[in-house]
Every structure is written in C-alpha cells, then in structure tokens.
Amino acid sequence: MSFIRRKGQTKALWFPKTASTAFTDGALVTLSSGYLIPCTSTTASVVGVCRKAVAATDSDYASTTSIPVEVPVEPSVEYEALTASATAANVGGSYDLTDSVTVNLSGSTYKIVNVVSVISATKVAVTLNTVYTLYA
C-alpha cells in the first residue's frame, strides 16, 4: 500500500527523477540536488506523493525524465498511510517515516507527517509537512 489521498485539494507538479532509481506510485518523495528521490527513514523534508511507478525495466529508468508528484494545495490534505500499532495517543503527533510508504510512530526526529486520526491499528490518516507551500 501507499499514501492514498482521503480529502483535500492537490496539484500535480512534474520533477526530474534521479536516474537509475525505482519509484513506487503513492510513495513519498523529496528532492536531492534538484532530482526526486524516494523518502527514507532519515528524510528531513517531503515534496509530495509520487504518482508514477518507475521500475528497472522501464525504458527511461537510467534517464532523468520528469514524473508527476501530487502536492497539497492546502495544509489540511489528508492521506491514508500504513503504520504499526497505532493508538488514539498518536493523534496530534508528528512522526517520521520507516520508508517511503510507511509511517514510523516511534520516531519524531524529522516530523514528516502529522497524525489526524487512527483508522485501524495499522492505518492512520495524516497530513504532510511539505517543503512546497502551494496553499492559497
């Protein structure tokens, strides 16, 4: 599973991807030296949600072609995300990532996402702390 938009307005922006890097549709991405990379557990900022999968078998895998990224245009855009052991105590907290598709409710160094509700023990609704401010 990946980050799935639940509500709110977004805009698709196109950014060049890092060559020879795989991307998952629905994964959080950030920029490094002007190119997109998937977020990791130590990512300090997020641009948005990747909206095109890129695999090693793709013809442009080794190129820096641009791919679409879903960027929130309002701070209240909510996404459903995977996690582990979510409880009501997590609501209102800001957390890190385990990887580009999973929220780490045990980490709060980088504060990439804000938990707004618990959907189940393994799913939370979050807003993103994005580096792009397209808010009206």
Image (cartoon, grey):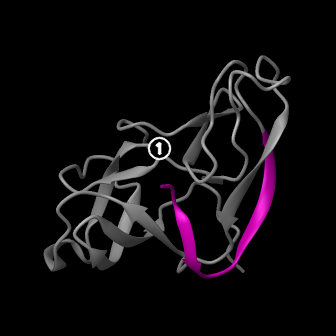
Q: Main secondary structure of the magenta part?
A: strand
Could you tell me the amino acid type at mark 1? Ser
Eyeballing the image, is 94 above or below 38? below
Picture quadrant of residue 49: bottom right
Q: Quadrant of the C terminus?
A: bottom right
* Residue indicated by mark 1: 100
Give the SS element for disc 1. loop
Q: Is residue 72 left or right of residue 80?
A: right
Tag count: 1
- The residue sitting at the front extreme is 57
Eyeballing the image, is 54 above or below 62? below
Which is more toward the observer, 121 or 16? 121
Going 66% across and 26% down the picture, which residue do you hit?
33
Going 85% across and 23% down the picture, which residue do you hit?
59
Going 17% across and 79% down the picture, which residue do you hit?
88
Q: Which range of residues does the magenta coloring cover?
A: 1-15
Going 83% across and 38% down the picture, which residue do you hit?
66
Q: Is residue 28 left or right of residue 13?
A: left
Q: Is residue 50 left or right of residue 113?
A: right
